[in-house]
Image (tube, rainbow, N blue to C red):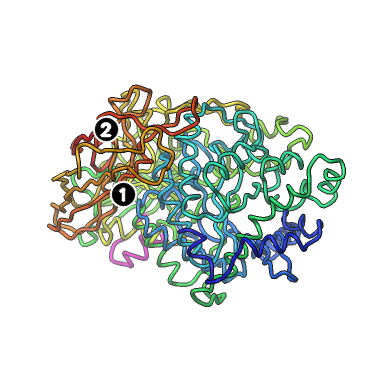
Amino acid sequence: MEIETSRQSAGFDADTASRNIIASVSLKEKIFEMHGRGILKLGLSVFFTKKLIPVKAGGNKKYNIPPTTFLDGPRGISFYKGATAFPVTMARGASWERDLEKRIGEAMGKEIRALNANYSGAVCMNVLRHPRWGRAQETYGEDPYHIGEMAVSLVGGIQQHNVQACAKHFAANSMENNRFGGSMNMDERTLHEVYLPHFKKVVKNGVASIMSAYNKLNGEYCGHSKKLLTDILRNDWGFKGYVTSDWEAGLYDTQKGIEAGMNIEMPAGRFYSFKKIKKLIAEDKITEKQIDNLIFPVIRTKLLFASNEDKQVYPKDLVGCKAHAELSQEAAEKSAVLLKNENNLLPLNKNKLKRIAIIGSLADVKQTGDRGSSNVFCDYIISPLEGVKNYLQDEVEILTAAANDINEVRNICGKADAVIVIAGTTYKDEGEYIGDWKMRDKDDPDKKNIAIYSGILALGGDRKYLHLHKEDIDTIHAAAAVNKNIVVSLVAGSAITVEEWYEEVPAIIETFYNGMEGGNALARILFGEVNPSGKLPFTLPKSENDLPPFNSFDADVDYGYYHGYTLFDKNKIEPRYPFGFGLSYTSFQLSDLSINSKIIIADCFPPYQGGAGGCDELKISVKIKNTGNKPGAEVVQLYIGFSNSQIDRPVKLLRGFEKVYLEAGEEKIISFKVDPNELVYYDPATKTWLIEKMQYEVFVGNSSLDNNMLKENFEIN
């Protein structure tokens, strides 16, 4: 959704209007556009009322420039009592459903407008390099293509309601505990092919704003990086929006920020103050023309959005409304991933149950995710136990026991016809790392004291390990010793390894942090009202040793070219569950894979510069049939293989997916178009994108490691 075409009212020239304003305003008014304000008022409002006041930046009534009015966050409006809490971004990534994510974006946009704001920090889209990352729950998964597709959908939904979407955190932000000082180091191919493509995709689709990352990239703070903020973002990608700093510690130097291309410092003018910028101009270290260039895209973008007519009115009762709660439940139902279902234990038949045990450390815990900047103060949360009670009413007796009372767990599980174990993580185990920035030395941001290094003062942060807590493992062992009909429901922001107890249970389902209606959604899945259709947005290993190294406090981290399924493919490691995996209560069959041409003539290659034409389009189709006796949905996944490459490339990469709903016995033809941009690799020597003239493979299946994948070849000549 391009801003230039969909946001601009007929006859309105935002470029000319912005230049005229800049020529008319004072230096002080210009600098006013470059920083946030009102952070103290915001903090007081949250503390006393649990209703966050939007943070503003800039604005000029004389020239009809609206302020940038910011509200977070990724799973709903942060810190506002009564807002809708949707499943976390990782859960929605597991839905693999673009339309659903767009509708969630629309709901977020409506609630933001209802609170008199116009700028959303919801689009968190960093790569999940390692599932121990504390903020894993805030992104869509491990694959850049999948992340980009889902993020574009969210941006499109948000911006339909004249809300400027901010995509974050740019770039390579995949570690939490040392996010303020750590340097993420990588070569140029890794940067351009793994950690930037999804950002490039949202830029090409008209995202209004980008937020820089706290961390360093190859030794330089991202907020100071001219390479990222100007050379790549503006010069290479043609970005016309504006960049804001991450909050409080995203900028450390006024001159470096200005020279890099940082447009707005948030949430206050600590470095972008009038006094500091005026002094630099007086000393001839920067020029007023540089300030003009920085505020031009800010004013231009705000005018473009303000010039568009609203689709509707935005009364305050949109916040947390029934329709949005229902959408939250729909998202929870479509995000759950069925990992194991031996002997079709699920769905449970309530007519055949007299007693059911609901146990585990999280059975009656009300949570929607971490308690960092994405925290939502929704009016209610349906816990798993409450959801099952709501569904069963008084038709089935429900037994419970404290997770740490192993004797009672054995007792009730021995009496039950089926056992549901709810286990996983909470905000204490993972999430945004709170406390770190408060303790940092302002003159030496990398300096850490023992309290920070040990994590004593932190809330959330990176996970210490991927397996369940001992208490949950002991509970599963105890239940399995006396009952064979056990379902384990996993709650977490990303992967939980299952090796300690996997063989003992017939059914496993991953629900993530599934929003305010999560308990109701889980019950409907367990009892067959909903057929699970989620797919893993990450690779679940058998051993954490199969993943890249991860140290939460490394000052320098080398990011390799491979992670996730590309690493497992390259090293021929078998995961417990592959990327894209998920079962259903029905079955599907793929057939009749077809390619429009076995030889693709690409006159614009090499090199591919995103040119104007000459490239044949690759069109692929496949037939899918629901071969079971229940309606359901399957995610058809298209991968392109590079086994004939003369350079080091992944075995295959995801390059298309579609979620299709089918009645029992129904079949459909699914079509894909593969953009030539998705076949290229980055050549650091020439700083261009190249495509190899060779034979490529096409794989179509239901995961990255589907043994029944359909295969075809095509050649670029």
Q: Which residue is mark 1?
A: 419
**Is 508 displayed left or right of 51 in the figure?**
left
**Is 94 displayed left or right of 664 in the figure?**
right
Q: Identify the residue at horizontal 52%, vertical 65% (top origin).
A: 7
The N terminus appears in which quarter of the rendering? Answer: bottom left
Q: Identify the residue at horizontal 73%, vertical 38% (top origin).
A: 256
> Helix, strand or loop at disc 2?
loop
> Which one is nearer the viewer's eye here, 497 or 680?
680
Whichever of labels 2 and 1 marks the residue nearer the N terminus, that label is 1
The magenta segment: 386-399
Q: Which mark is residue 368?
A: none
Question: Which of the 4 image quarters holds residue 521?
Answer: bottom left
Please say if 143 is above or below 511.
above
Amino acid type, callout 2: Asn
Q: Is residue 500 visible?
A: no
Residue 177 sits inside the magenta stretch:
no
Question: Can you give x and y, in whole percent of width and height, for residue 527 in the image?
Answer: 27, 58
Tell me the mark number nearer the camera, choosing from 2 and 1: 2
Residue 389 sits inside the magenta stretch:
yes
- In whole angstroms, how far apart are the C-alphas of marks 2 and 1? 58 Å
Q: Which residue is mark 2?
A: 717
